[in-house]
Image (cartoon, rainbow, N blue to C red):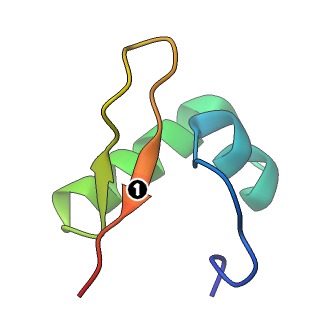
Amino acid sequence: MLWDGFEGKLTTTKWAKICKTSQATALRDINDLIEKGILVKGEEGSKNTNYILVEN
């Protein structure tokens, strides 16, 4: 549901703002979603790491 109307690339900073949490917690959340197959890491490098929603 958080994805409705979301545009651009998802980053830990954006996730932290959406969820109103710290960046460390946001990264843990994102890593959990990656493990569950919901997100994948984008192509860009470490400083510009972004995440993409996996299409069904």
Residue 46 in picture, x, y percent from top left: 39, 14
Q: Residues within 10 Å of mark 1 (few under 14, many from 20)?
A: some
Q: Residue at x 33, y 61 (%)?
A: 33
Q: Amino acid at mark 1?
A: Ile
In the rendered view, does 6 fall on the left or right side of 43? right
Identify which residue is drawn at 69% across, 84% down: 4
Who's the residue at 30% across and 32% down the image?
43
State whether residue 45 is above or below residue 34: above
List x then y, in percent, for residue 51.
42, 47
Q: Nearer the viewer, residue 10 or 7?
A: 7
Quarter holding the C terminus is bottom left
Q: Which residue is mark 1?
A: 52
Q: Camera-side residue: 20 or 1?
A: 1
Q: Quadrant of residue 16?
A: top right
Q: Is residue 5 above or below residue 9?
A: below
In the image, residue 22 lies at what x, y percent?
Answer: 70, 36
